[in-house]
Image (cartoon, rainbow, N blue to C red):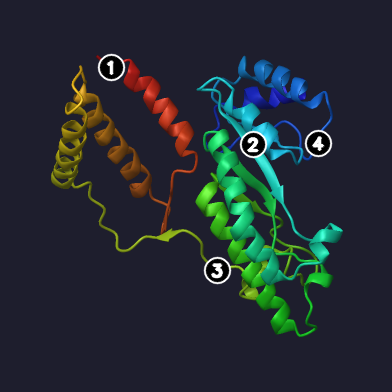
Amino acid sequence: DALKILAKELESMNNVVGLQLLNGPQNHGSLEGWYRKTLDVLRSVAPTLPLYIHDAWDTRHYAGFAGKRPDLDFTVVDHHLYRCFTSQDHQLSGDEHANVLRSQMSGELGARSSESHGNLVIGEWSAALNPASLRSGAAGEQDRQRRVFARAELDIFEQHCAGWFFWTYKKDGWDAGWSLRDTVRAEIMPPWHGIRRQGNRIVNDENRKKAENDKALAEHSNYWDKYGGHYEHWRFANGFDQGWDDAFAFFAFDLGTSIPEIGFKGQWAKRSLVVHEKER
C-alpha cells in the first residue's frame, strides 16, 4: 500500500529516476513472486514510472526476470558491488581486485545487462577496500590501490550499465574509501565524470544528418536487396533520423558545462519502436 501511494505521487515527477521496491532483500523463495505481484499492482497506478528491483545478489536470475517483463514495462535491476566484506575479498590487493573486475566481472555485467535489455544499474558501490587488501602501510600506496580499483569499477560500469550511484556522498571524519567528497580530494575518484561541453553554439546540422542517412541507407539497401524479397527501406531511413534527433536532444539539453547522455538506451529503443510500428 505504501508503494502504491508513492508510485501514484511520483509518476508525474520528471526529476524522479524511479522507485525501488526493496533494498537488499534476502533471496528468499517467495521474493520473485512478491516482485511479480507488486510490479503488476504498481503498473496499474504508474504505467511509465521506472521500478527498481534489487537482485538479492543473484544477478543472473533477476536480470532474466526483468528481461521477461512486457516490453514497455520499465523494470530496472539494481546490483550492489563491494569488494571489502568477505574473507575472499581480504585476500586480494586493490590491483588484484581491479584485474578481476576487468577480466571477469566486466563480462558478467555485460551478460546481465543484455538479459535485462540494458536495464541494469549499480545502485551502491565505493572505493573502499578492507585493510587486509591494502598491503602497504604507506598512505600514498593505499590511495593508489584505491584509485586503481575505483577506475576499474568506473570503466566497467560505464561500459555495461545504465547508471551508477556511489555510496556515500560524505561521512563524519575523513574516509577516502566511503566518502565521495574525500575520494575526490584524495584524487582517488576523478573530480569530473562525463562529457564536458566545448563552446556554447550547438546546431543540429541537417545537411550532415541527410548525408550520413543517405550513406547508411545505401549500404543497408544494397546489402539486403541482394537477397530479394519485399523490404521497406524507408523504415531504416526514418529510424536513422529519429535516432539522430533523439541523441541531439540529449546533447543540446542545457546542463551548464555537462552534456547529458542517454542511460537506458534499450528502454528508449523499445519505446521508439512501438511508435515506429504504428507508422505506415
State how far apart marks 3 and 1 are (Cα). 45 Å
State how far apart marks 1 and 4 are (Cα). 43 Å
**Residue 190 sits in which quadrant?**
bottom right
Give the mark toward the camera: 3 or 1.
1
First in sequence, mark 2 or 3: give its number: 2
Q: Is residue 247 above or below residue 28?
A: below
Q: Which residue is mark 1?
A: 279
Pointers 3 and 4 in contact (C-beta within 8 Å): no
What is the number of the mark on residue 191? 3
Give the mark toward the camera: 2 or 3.
2
Q: Is residue 182 visible?
A: no
Under circle 2, the secondary element is strand
- What's the amino acid at mark 4? Pro
Under circle 1, the secondary element is loop
Pointers 1 and 4 in contact (C-beta within 8 Å): no
First in sequence, mark 1 or 4: give its number: 4
Residue 22 falls left or right of residue 156:
right
Q: Which residue is mark 4?
A: 25
Who's the residue at 34% across and 38% down the image? 246
| Front in this rendered view, residue 15 or 31 | 31
State how far apart marks 2 and 3 are (Cα). 28 Å
Residue 12 on image: x %, y %: 54, 27
| Front in this rendered view, residue 191 or 60 | 60
Who's the residue at 63% across and 22% down the image? 8
Q: Is residue 270 above or below residue 144?
A: above
